[in-house]
Image: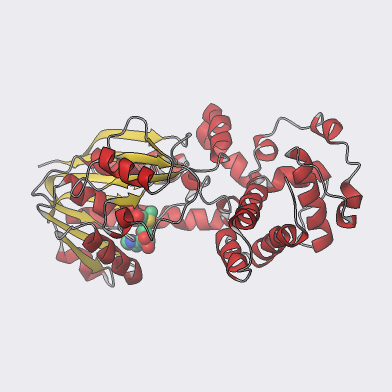
Amino acid sequence: MRMFPNTVAGVIEALETSFGKGIYADKVVERILRSNKKWGSRDRSFVAEHTYEIVRNWRFLWWLLDMEPSTKRKSLWKLVGVYFLWKGIDLPDWPKFDSIRDFDLPSRLAELPKNIGIEESFPEWFNERAENELGGNWAAIAHNLNVPAYVILRVNTLKSHRADVMEELREAGHTVTELPDSEIGIILEGRPRLNHLPAFQEGRIEVQDGGSQQIAPFTGVTAGQKVIDACAGAGGKTLHLAEMMKNRGSIVSMDIEERKLGELEKRAQRSGINIVKTHPIDSRTTISKYEHWADTLLLDVPCSGTGVIKRDPDTKWKLQPEHLERTLEIQADILERYSNMLRPGGTLVYATCSIFKSENEDQVRNFLENHPEYTLEQEERVNPCEYGDGFYMARLIKND
Ligand SMILES: C[S@@+](CC[C@H](N)C(=O)[O-])C[C@H]1O[C@@H](n2cnc3c(N)ncnc32)[C@H](O)[C@@H]1O
């Protein structure tokens, strides 16, 4: 592989800004790519791919060097050098790499301790918490969270069929395969830009991870129902619910961020969906207005995002224990207050993209203890795997 000083400097700048200023790496990479318009597609993927891979392996790489993490340029050149050695990529003969050229990688690797936090690069507080909450499952989950995510599409069954969309994408030069165990998912190779594709502009496809695609079917919604998606965001699951309902019935999509609901409305229009009404949550009265209204209530609550670290490796370093504690309180509050929107006999689905038991099974157990009027019908974990992120979902029935 040929390496160029300006693209390696791009990786170093991205790391310096992301770790130095606490900005998410995807935002930093996006800005760097925008300000280097002359870079070709290979240069762009070089900067993006290696920045994310170093973010993923940040703690392990510093351990290799036996150094404390730093955002000083000189140290970052060393880090990037040891990273290339570890990846089996020959170092170019630039003086900046001289201090790392004779690094004895095999001897250092022979000293690697049996610690998932170092081997798989997670902060120690995170590693300890995951070991406590996930026990023997943590090693495999940690490993899978470091496998870069594929782009997964969901076919809009109101407008098309998977075979037709796959044919259309192939004709446009893309490599696609069916998502295993799914009738509507497509795996798209590479990271092509999608928004110029007619299939995207005309609402025949949406980008949605394989794990996330399991949540709407888990709710069991049917055509004609009254549904509330109370933490709808930009509507990934609202759209899927509407498609399952064959665009018949009524969905109210809520969120505290009105901007996201605006995006949801645009996506619904593109998808040919007209049963969705949005409702920003601006006071407690928004919730009381819908008392006992919904047949199905989806609470896709804000969470640590630890199930989607494949996609957002920065979460490892940006998430702090105090954020997690605050998130636990918000989740409990949402369950407690928003469940009032469900009619007796209705179905509540609680979902997260977190791996932590405290955000998942424990929240549901606490809720059930205080609410004997609910019965847990089913709960499922989708562990991060080759084609998907990590999710948790629980289906509760409110007794008549
Ligand atoms: C996991 S995301 C939802 C993703 C979305 N359902 C989808 O499928 O694309 C959680 C959402 O909850 C929203 N949120 C945070 N606090 C909330 C609250 N107290 N009530 C309702 N929504 C909230 C966030 O703005 C965010 O959009």
Marks counted in the figure total 0
Q: Position of residue 327 (x, y in %)?
A: 45, 56
Q: Nearer the viewer, residue 125 or 53?
A: 53
Q: Which residue occupies 67% across, 66% down?
A: 17
When the figure is inspected, residue 332 is found, relative to residue 186, above or below; the finding is below
Horizontal side of 316 relative to 329 (left or right) equals right
Q: Which residue occupies 26% across, 56% down?
A: 203
Instruction: Identify the image quadrant of the C terminus.
Output: top left
- Ligand 1: image quarter: bottom left
| Quadrant of residue 366 within the rendered picture | top left
Residue 206: tell me if it is visible.
yes
Q: Position of residue 361 (x, y in %)?
A: 38, 38
Horizontal side of 39 relative to 89 (left or right) equals left
Horizontal side of 314 relative to 242 (left or right) equals right
Which coloring applies here?
Answer: secondary structure
Q: Which residue occupies 83% across, 31% down?
A: 106
When the figure is inspected, residue 76 is found, relative to residue 88, above or below; the finding is below
Q: Nearer the viewer, residue 153 or 73?
A: 153
Q: Position of residue 126 (x, y in %)?
A: 59, 45
When the figure is inspected, residue 229 is found, relative to residue 21, above or below; the finding is above
Instruction: Identify the image quadrant of the N terminus.
Output: top right
Horizontal side of 373 relative to 170 (left or right) equals left
Q: Nearer the viewer, residue 255 or 1?
A: 1
Q: Which residue occupies 32% across, 56% down?
A: 200
Residue 395: tell me if it is visible.
no
Q: Nearer the viewer, residue 113 or 364?
A: 113
Q: Position of residue 181 (x, y in %)?
A: 33, 30
When the figure is inspected, residue 109 is found, relative to residue 311, above or below; the finding is above
